[in-house]
């Protein structure tokens, strides 16, 4: 598996396929692809997209916002999400994101050096809070 930039239509199709798998819809995928400052994919030797990460740079405030990151169900639990975030950490001096309020997920981000900055009640849906996390080199 290799983390790299998006290379063409096959990668875009792979991202759309994974986005639909993760989010159970297609709402927002066009905006994600059009508005992101940068996108990375995690691809296997055959070019299948196993994961992706998209960021929007906020140059004026000196950080990049991770707007979406996902790994396919088939490839989870193998360190691929960690590899995608490590690639972002190598590119940007500071990252911010909002994550689901889940112990396992928050531990994952804390293990990568992220710190909690705040909470958003009902961010994802009623009863599903979001946690604002930040990392700085």
Image (cartoon, rainbow, N blue to C red):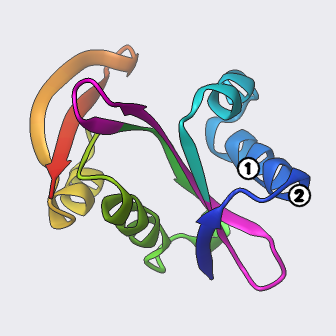
Q: Position of residue 5 (x, y in %)?
A: 64, 60
Q: Which residue in the structure is indicated by mark 2? A: 10
Residue 120 covered by magenta stretch: no
Report the residue that reaches farthest toward the right: 9
Along the viewing direction, whichever of 52 and 90 lies nearer the viewer: 90
Q: Is residue 59 magenta?
A: yes
Q: Nearer the viewer, residue 80 or 24?
A: 80
Report x, y in % for residue 22. 63, 44
Range covered by the magenta-colored residues: 41-64
Residue 30 visible (yes or no): yes
Could you tell me which secondary element the residue under label 2 belongs to? Answer: helix
Q: Is residue 72 visible?
A: no
Q: Quadrant of the N terminus?
A: bottom right
Label 2: few (<14), some or many (≥20) within 10 Å? few
Of the 4 image quadrants, the one containing the C terminus is bottom left
Tell me which residue sits at (78%, 59%) in the image: 7
Residue 107 coordinates in the image, percent (x, y)? 19, 59
Give 126 or 1, whichever is nearer the viewer: 1
Give the residue pinned by disc 1: 15
Write the residue at 10% across / 32% down. 117
Q: Is residue 43 left or right of residue 135?
A: right
* Residue name at image x 72 percent, y 51 percent: 18
Element at badge 1?
helix
Would residue 53 be found to the left or right of residue 32 on screen?
left
Separation of marks 1 and 2 at Cα, in angstroms: 9 Å
Taken as a whole, is the magenta stretch helix, strand or loop? Answer: strand
Q: Is residue 91 above or below residue 96?
A: below
Q: Quadrant of residue 82?
A: bottom left
């Amino acid at each position: 598996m290799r983390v790299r930039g998006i290379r063409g239509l096959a990668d875009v199709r792979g991202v759309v396929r994974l986005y639909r798998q993760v989010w159970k819809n297609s709402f927002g995928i066009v905006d994600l692809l059009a508005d992101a400052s940068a996108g990375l994919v995690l691809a296997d030797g055959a070019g299948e997209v196993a994961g992706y990460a998209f960021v929007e740079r906020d140059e004026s405030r000196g950080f990049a916002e991770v707007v979406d990151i996902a790994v396919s169900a088939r490839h989870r639990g193998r360190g691929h999400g960690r590899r995608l975030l490590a690639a972002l950490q190598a590119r940007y001096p500071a990252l911010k994101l909002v994550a689901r309020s889940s112990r396992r997920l928050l531990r994952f981000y804390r293990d990568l050096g992220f710190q909690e900055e705040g909470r958003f009640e009902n961010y994802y849906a009623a009863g599903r809070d979001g946690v604002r996390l930040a990392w700085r080199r």
